[in-house]
Image (spheres, grey):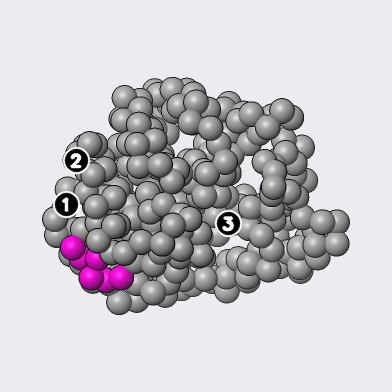
Amino acid sequence: MSIKKGIYAASLSIFKEDFMLDVDSTIKHAEKVIKNGAHGVCLLGSTGFAQYIDLSSKKKLLDKINGNKFIDNFIVGTGSNSLIENINLMKHSLENGIDKFLLMPPAYYKYSDEGVYSYYANIVQKVPESKIILYNFEKLSGYKFSIKIVEKLVNDFPQQMVGIKDSSYNLYEKLKIPNFMIFPGSETKLLKGLKLGCSGIISAICNVTAPLARRVFDDYFNNKKQTINERLCAVREVFDKTNLISGLHSFLSFEDNKYKVILPPLGLLSQKDEKKLMSELKKLDFYPEKNIAA
């Protein structure tokens, strides 16, 4: 199943008190986001603690997803600095019916465009069935994609390189490749991106803004007047003042205590920051649970 245009949430992972991945709750959360309007979700990505979750738990999640009614709406974030571990997880995903991946180049070491090309070329060689969305986020990986390297990867691997998530925002306004999908990483770029020919967004905050973002998306393609884009952007800007993962878990913990467990060294917002977050969202009439009504 090909990746379609739309609103995608970088889905949260839910943990048990012992910090092990709560597979069932993580899947239920992803299903809820889709039911609330998202075209799909990215599981085990950076918002879902990709680098912090052990490979065994990731595989258990994928095993449980096999046969899920929303399986065509799932993208897997490979989330590892290890080339071999990413290939291992991608093969396991394919065995469970998912061939769509969001794949960031490794963090920690500095490397060149040639190194990035080799990284993805080796993955394509080992997992040729994969459909890959490149993940451009210099803040996390230390590497920023250029137009030149994206064009080279797409030219050499057109069947595998199907899109890019641009969270560094140096590409979405300039990159023009036929039949190549571009997803900015923020609600504030959604409408502008659509006007430029982008395919939608992949955003952490779509865990809670999916209904609003979907309305903006649908109204654009239905040539309707935009009535809630300003509110959508304002909500995103409030969350941008926090650590996004901590902010989301704190916000959603008002719905369910399960969201209170976060893998160290991350944690919930301080009481002061949580109070500020909720106060600013209240001014926008954006509350836990209430956010599902666009």
Residue bearing the label numbered 3: 205
Residue 34's spot in the image, x, y percent? 49, 43
Residue 131's tag is: none
Q: Quadrant of the C terminus?
A: bottom right
Mark 2–mark 3 CB contact (< 8 Å): no
Based on the displayed image, in which of its 4 quarters is residue 230 positioned?
bottom right
Is residue 18 on the magenta stretch?
no
Residue bearing the label numbered 1: 157
Q: Earlier in the sequence, mark 2 or mark 3?
A: 2
Q: Amino acid at mark 2?
A: Gln
SS state under label 3: loop
Q: Nearer the viewer, mark 2 or mark 3?
A: 2
Residues in magenta, as a range: 146-152
Q: Is residue 186 visible?
A: yes
Q: Amino acid at mark 1?
A: Phe
Badge 3, how many Cα within 10 Å: few under 14, some, many 20+? many
Depth check, front residue: 35 or 240: 240
Q: Earlier in the sequence, mark 3 or mark 1?
A: 1
Residue 164's spot in the image, x, y percent? 33, 59
Residue at x 38%, y 53% (from the top left corner)? 105
Q: Is residue 183 above or below residue 58?
A: below
Based on the displayed image, in which of its 4 quarters is residue 117 positioned?
bottom left
Q: Is residue 168 above or below residue 266?
A: below
Residue 16's spot in the image, x, y percent? 69, 29
Q: Quadrant of the N terminus?
A: top left
Residue 98's spot in the image, x, y percent? 34, 33
Residue at x 50%, y 59% (from the top left corner)? 140
Residue 125's tag is: 2
Residue at x 22%, y 49% (from the top left corner)? 121
Q: Is residue 48 above or below residue 222?
A: above
Q: Nearer the viewer, mark 3 or mark 1?
A: 1
Q: Earlier in the sequence, mark 2 or mark 1?
A: 2
